Amino acid sequence: MKLVLATRNKHKLQEIREIFRLPGLELVSALDFPELEDVVEDGATFEANAVKKAVSLTQATGFWSLADDSGLEVDALNGAPGVYSARYAGEPVDYAANNRKLLRELEGAATRRARFRCVIALADPSGPIRTVEGRCEGTIIDELRGRQGFGYDPLFVPEGYTQTFAEMDGPLKNSMSHRGRALAAAEKTWGEILRMGL
Ligand code: ITT
């Protein structure tokens, strides 16, 4: 049974493949359909963007599709970068520039509290769309630490830990991350459908 992951982000794909292992489910991705155009992510919420990406890929391929829309919300910045996390410092996507901008914006901030959010949408070629969400609370530190992961990982220390996500190995990050939690909810909520119904 084939499920198309509606992302071209190789880091996300790696994490999703590590976390989401259901017997009998063959995971392919948007990278396997190079002829398809990128979806314009113009939704105001993670949910709207996740649904748009999943529906668009299902309509184009005829397969069930699973999309991840995610990002970082920083309290002192009123929730920014939020849905603009990937392109916070402009186009093209540049993680190092995003991290530099975040550190600049947070100079002198009274709180460095933040959270990662991940909305997963599952689209069914016959119509219904479902979504689940995972969150991970934490703090933005004031220097980059660690080389693993991607995006804002070198600046994010999850609650209850002293290491950044970029200092953790994949299984440890996945055990508490927004993506790990969203995919655990996806498996709990849709496992039966995905095992039986595709
Ligand atoms: P797709 O739309 O193709 O899935 P994308 O990278 O554009 O890829 P998003 O629009 O969901 O995906 O943006 C996600 C951004 O949020 C990502 O580029 C990072 O900057 C940040 N982000 C999300 N999850 C993260 C994680 O686990 N660690 C660090 N940064 C993360």
Image (tube, helix red, strand yellow):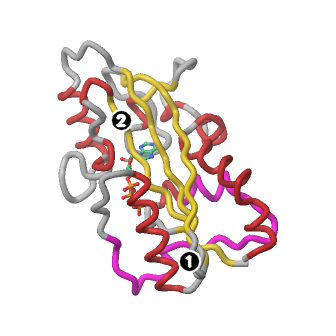
Q: 72 or 48: nearer the eye?
A: 48
Relative image position of residue 192 (x, y in whole percent) = 79, 63
Quarter of the image for residue 187 reads bottom right
How crowded pointer 1 is (Cα within 10 Å; few <14, some 14-19, many 20+) is rated as: few
- 25 falls in the magenta region: yes
Name the residue at 29% across, 69% down. Answer: 40
Relative image position of residue 110 (x, y in whole percent) = 26, 12
Decide which of tag 2 and tag 1 comes sooner along the chain. 2
**Is residue 145 shown above or below 22?**
above
| Element carrying mark 1 | loop
Identify the residue under disc 2.
73
Q: Which mark is residue 52?
A: none
- 37 falls in the magenta region: yes
- The quarter of the picture where the N terminus appears is bottom right
Q: Which residues are magenta?
A: 13-39
How crowded pointer 2 is (Cα within 10 Å; few <14, some 14-19, many 20+) is rated as: many
Q: Amino acid at mark 1?
A: Gly
